[in-house]
Amino acid sequence: MLYTDILKDFLAISSWKSLLAILIFFSLQISLWFFLKKFKNKFLHLFSGLVLGLLFGLVIQIIAGFPESFTEKASNESEVWKKELYWIYELDSWAVLFKKIFILSITLLMIPLIFLSIYRAITKKSSKRLGRITGKGISFLMINVAIAFCIAAGIGILLKIGVTSDGKKVLDEIGGQGSNNSDSTDIKSIPNMIIDYLPKNFISDLGKDAVIPVLIMALIVGLAVKAISIKNEKKVESFVKLMDASWEIVLKIVNSFIKIIPLAIMSIVTNLMITQSLTALTAVGKVLGAGYLSLFICVIYLTCILAIVKINPSKWWKNGWRPAYQGLVTQSSSATLPFTMNALVDKMKVDESCVNTIIPLSTTMGMIGGAGAEGGLIVALLWTGSDSNIIHDQGIWLFLLLGLIMTMIISLGVPGTPGTSTLVITSLLGSLGVPSFKNAAFSIMLVLEDIYDIGRTAVNIIAAMVVSTIVGFSEGMIGEDSEILSKKAILYQSKINETRILKDEKSTNIKTLKLKILSKDLDENIKLSKKQYEMELKKIKSKYQQSIKDLKSKTKD
């Protein structure tokens, strides 16, 4: 008995099937590692793990006979793996090893990476634009959430995703209508949500996965360092060097973990293939189809936005697909953070301070797929999947409006990690006043969680990159040598930068003029009277207004 327990619980190898499958899996991984060492082709590195994982998982499914379910109910009503398929569970325990190593490693570095990114963005000389960049970034992310919600909700209602092929309401069939509101969820008010976002302890907040408190701390530290360095740069010289060195160290560690991406991808895909029933998806195929159709339309919308603002879509996609693909297989926006930033800064030449501000924000707020499309699908499922008066008495437009508002609020705190459905479903149903449908909604959405999460995460990353690109372009912060800029876009950026130079000159001249009237140390002969000051101020303003006007008319010509 003890011997069996050691094999089953400690080694997770209790049969010859699991032993053989595990040995074959790791033999394939070792072979893949040495194979890729000989070839430097990036395409091969990205897709070899995916293909190998799919093939290995498919073979396991064939051997298992494509089971409709891997689990069964035990005597205590809990879900346990079927005895004849327990060897697959043990294989999965070992197969997820590199998946866990990769995701946990990137998660380990996520907080220092975000802290240092925001700190560097603030302390850079170009940080005068930081307020505008942040405001534009958050606004665009939230607009994306609203548009994705409308797309997903509209498609879901049109396709009647809550109605089965024989005309039954799926949520009522599962048992949502018969609930007595026993499910409950704590609904937080907006002031309480804001309070929760504020950092409470510098050290403990850095040790948590909460991104927004870290952003706020980085903002405070960056502004303090900048304020001190203006007065006396030597006082913070050592600290600045420490932060620069920390940034280099974090990037070096990240680059080291990048090397195991093919193994991690194979691990992730194998895990997905051997733990999901291929036939079970047919029961919720309509929901999954509506979800992916919504995501596809979102990608078209984002591509059109790039074209409208004169960014070359084909050149953008040439560099933008890689982070999206890595998000697709890791199912985590946070895990792809360094790759996304690298693609924007090094490949597309978007200014680092813009990227370092928007991309970390996008891992926790304004997710187009993780909040917008997900929320739209859930609301459509509620509307079409039940005849409950609690839902339909509100009327479709009010119900959709409430769903949209609550989805946008919830989107301010969705984590960029796998499995966001639980948070979105619980929060949205609770805030709409129908928490009793939680179990019924879970039984539909969680079946397709892993499959839908693949596309959802990829679209989240694409949206974040598009927002960074457009905000950077609107601020004239994309390098002129970037291949994503069209000729018109280069001229537009040139106009923005020339206008900004004139505005900065105007601001500097006004500050100098103010000193001549306010400074007590100036000689009385140099000091200006109030009338002289007003006249000079008027001259400066009119001069620069005319210069900016001439520049705009010149650009139009």
Image: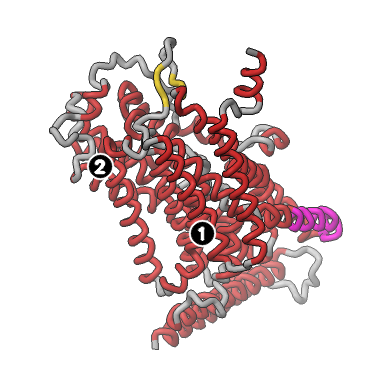
Question: What residue is at 55 percent from the left and 64 percent from the top?
Answer: 44
The residue located at (46%, 65%) in the rendering is: 470
Numbered disc 1: secondary structure: helix
Task: Specify which label sits upstream in the sequence, 1 or 2.
Answer: 1
At numbered mark 2, what does the secondary structure look like: helix, strand or loop?
A: helix
Quadrant position of residue 195: top right
Find out whether the residues at labels 1 and 2 contact each other: C-beta distance under 8 Å: no
Q: Quadrant of the C terminus?
A: bottom left
Q: Main secondary structure of the magenta part?
A: helix
In the image, residue 269 sits, relative to residue 177, either above or below, namely below
Question: What residue is pinned by disc 1?
Answer: 47
Residue lying farthest to the top in this orientation: 75
**Which is in the foreground here, disc 1 or disc 2?**
1
Mark 1 packing: few (<14 Cα in 10 Å), some, or many (20+)?
Answer: some
Q: Which mark is residue 286?
A: 2
**Location of residue 131 in the rendering, given as x and y in whole percent from the top left corner:** 56, 57
Magenta residues span 232-249
Q: Nearer the viewer, residue 408 or 378?
A: 378
Residue 467 in magenta stretch: no
Q: Residues within 10 Å of mark 2 (few under 14, many from 20)?
A: some
Left or right: 175 in relation to 512: left
Looking at the rendered image, the quarter that the N terminus falls into is top right
Give the vertical position of 521 relative to 428 (above or below). below
From the viewer's perspective, tell me whether residue 284 is left or right of residue 332.
left
Return the x and y of residue 51 as percentages of the image width and height.
48, 55
